[in-house]
Structure formats: structure tokens, C-alpha cells
Amino acid sequence: PAVVIATRNAGKIRELRVLLAEINLSLLTLADFPECPEVVEDGDTFLANAAKKAQAIAACTGLPALADDSGLEVAALGGRPGVFSARYGADRTAPQPHTDADNYVKLLEEMADIPWEQRRARFVCCIVVAFPGGRQVITEGVCQGFIDFEPKGAGGFGYDPVFWLPQYNRTMAEVGLEVKNQISHRAQALKEMQAILADLLHR
Ligand code: ITT
């Protein structure tokens, strides 16, 4: 059976491919379906956005579609950037396309005066698999950490260089893909999804 990974984020695709390798699926991406429209992510929640992306791509391709909507919630900022994580630093380099560094540099600047004990944050990932008939399966994962004072490491993507994991005394960009894929919000959401998907698709 085939599943379309409904994301344009290369970092997500890299991680999802490794995590999904265990179940026997042929993985297609949006690059295989250039005719599919860009989906506007205007939802208030990770779930709303993931469902919207998965449903649109399932409808467009006629195949089951897996979407990941994720982001960073910082306690001291009332949960921001949340669903705005991908575009948080966009104003820093406008009108040029912004980078991951724009996002975390803006965050570090905003949090410059906040002490360690108030730098708790969590990554959240909502995964939705939508089937062409309208059925959908939803899972979610959370990964707890702290926002460091400066970026460290070159692995991962997004906010990984500033997301410090107390149990490793390293940032998510320093621990390597193998460790990230054991502990991340995406890994947890997908682990739960794996069993459901294997069952639904191989029946
Ligand atoms: P798609 O909508 O095409 O999937 P996107 O990058 O726009 O790609 P989101 O709207 O879900 O995806 O935004 C997620 C953002 O949250 C992402 O761009 C990163 O900035 C951040 N993020 C999510 N997962 C992350 C991870 O594992 N490590 C670091 N940052 C992450």
C-alpha cells in the first residue's frame, strides 16, 4: 500500500521516512503530485491544521495521506509560538524568505532576560492520516525541554539548536538523528500511528 507524506518540510520528511521504514509502505511525497494545491494553514490548533492538510491531499491524490503539524510551545510566552512556529521569525528578513535561524534568533532575543527555571518548553506534534473515504486517524506526541541561551549543534531542523534536553545535557541538534527519533514529539506520535496504520493498510 502507498501513503502520501503531505508535507513540504524537508526535515520532517527525513525523520518520517526513517520512522516509517518499519512498516512495509511505499512512501510518496508532494513532489510526486505537483498538481496538488498549497494548503493554507489557518487553524487555531495543531490538530485543525494537520487534518486540513491530510484531508486536502487525500482528496487530491485519491490515496491515504499523512500530515504532521507541529511546533514549539514556550511556557513563559503563554504557549507561543505554537501554531505560528514555522513563520515566527519571518519579519526579521522580510521580504526575503526567512530561515530556521530567523525563528530561533527571534525567540532567543525575546527570552534574553528569562532565567533557566522559567525556560521550560515543549515540542508538540499532531499526526493525521486521512483516507479518501473520509475516515481519519489522529495521534499526538510531546517532548519536554528548555530553551537554551544560545544555539548549539547542526543536526535536526527548526528550533532544535536551542531546545535543550536535560537528560542528555545537549540540544536536540546535538544528540543525532538516532536519539532524536527515539525521544521526539514526532517519534511518539508516529509510534502510536504505526500500529494503527499497519493494521488498516495491510488488512
Ligand atoms: P508543512 O506544513 O508543509 O508540513 P511546515 O514547516 O510549515 O511544513 P508546520 O506548519 O507544522 O510545518 O510548522 C512546524 C514548525 O515547528 C517547523 O517549521 C519548525 O520551525 C518547528 N518544528 C516542528 N517540529 C520540529 C522539530 O522536530 N525540531 C525543531 N523544530 C520543529
Image (spheres, rainbow, N blue to C red):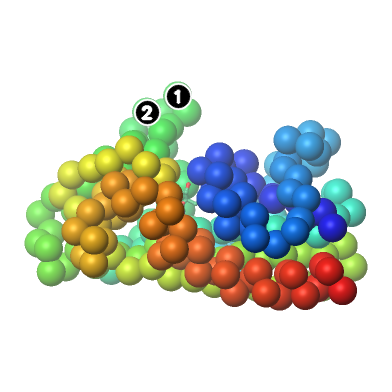
Amino acid residing under circle 2:
Thr
Q: Could you tell me if the residues under marks 1 and 2 are in contact, i.e. CB atoms within 8 Å?
A: yes
Q: Would you place residue 58 above or below residue 117 in this image?
A: above
Near mark 2 (Cα within 10 A), the count class, few <14, some 14-19 or many ≥20, is few
**Left or right of residue 4, residue 63 in this image:** right
Instruction: Identify the element where label 1 is drawn.
Output: loop
Image-quadrant location for residue 198: bottom right
Q: Residue at x 57, y 52 (%)?
A: 18
Report the residue marked by disc 2.
93
Comparing 132 with 166, the one in front is 166
**Left or right of residue 106, residue 84 in this image:** right
Q: Residue at x 41, y 65 (%)?
A: 183
Image quarter of the N terminus? bottom right
Q: Residue at x 43, y 53 (%)?
A: 178
Question: Whole-percent x and y of residue 160?
Answer: 35, 49
Instruction: Identify the element where label 2 is drawn.
Output: helix
Report the residue marked by disc 1.
96
Q: Would you place residue 191 above or below residue 57 in this image?
A: below
Amino acid residing under circle 1:
Gln
